[in-house]
Amino acid sequence: MEKHVLGLELPTDPRWVNIAEKNIQDILVDHAYCEQKAASSCISLIIQYPDKEKLVEVLTPIVAEEWGHFERVIEELKKRQMTFGPNRKDEYVERLQKIIKKGGSRDDQLTERLLMNALIEARSCERFRLLWKEIGDVELSKFYYELMVSEAGHYKTFLSLAKEYKDSEVVEKRWRELLREESEIVKTLEVRGDRMH
């Protein structure tokens, strides 16, 4: 289903969700930072590309939505008497940044950034789905279902924005390349249950 819905080449290792369930505080803290970074990334794009009207129009509500999710994750921590901790290195995103092409025109750079955001959203959504379906905490399962539904369209939004500013075929070709490379990253990363990615 994930490949059909999200385009991902490789599903998450099923062991991830079992380990994650045993480290729910770590997962929630890491998830909170993911939402914060998603909001920051959209703000950064709006600041750097204020002339792209469609981009500004589409990403502005996403900033509010991602920040709202950050607040909701913090609430889930509080409910469980868990504390919000420091941010930790996101090896998945660091590895993704290495496969993003540097240089080129301003629009080339925009395409790469939008596609990277699309990848992160697709993988996050796939993991929300796993948490919804597999974890025993009924409240958290419901929470992750709501977030999965809410976030499901974001990766498509980033893809369609990329096609707004670059030839559709060029974007599709690059997207397929990135999906292949992302699957290699996921394959070689250690399965850790204290990180969202």
Image (tube, helix red, strand yellow):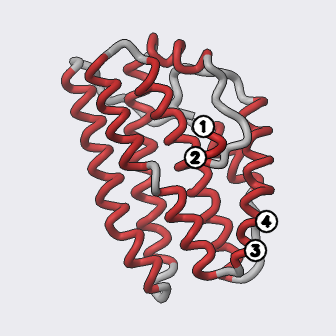
Question: Which label's residue is closer to the chain start, 2 or 4?
Answer: 2
**SS at circle 3:** helix
Asked if labels 1 and 3 touch by Cβ distance under 8 angstroms, the answer is no
**SS at circle 1:** loop
Residue type marked 4? Lys
Residue 32 lies, with reference to residue 6, above or below; the image says above
Asked if labels 3 and 2 touch by Cβ distance under 8 angstroms, the answer is no
Question: Which label's residue is closer to the chain start, 2 or 3?
Answer: 2
Q: Position of residue 5 (x, y in %)?
A: 58, 46
Q: Which mark is residue 173?
A: 4
CA separation in Å, label 3 and label 1: 25 Å
Residue type marked 3? Glu
Asked if labels 2 and 1 touch by Cβ distance under 8 angstroms, the answer is yes
Give the class, few, some or many, for how many residues have Cα within 10 Å of label 4's Cα (few <14, many ≥20).
Answer: few
CA separation in Å, label 2 and label 4: 18 Å
Q: Which mark is residue 5?
A: 2
Q: Which residue is mark 3?
A: 169
Q: Which mark is residue 1?
A: 1
Question: Which label's residue is closer to the chain start, 3 or 1?
Answer: 1
Instruction: Give the position of the C terminus as an image quadrant.
Output: top right
Give the class, few, some or many, for how many residues have Cα within 10 Å of label 3's Cα (few <14, many ≥20).
Answer: few
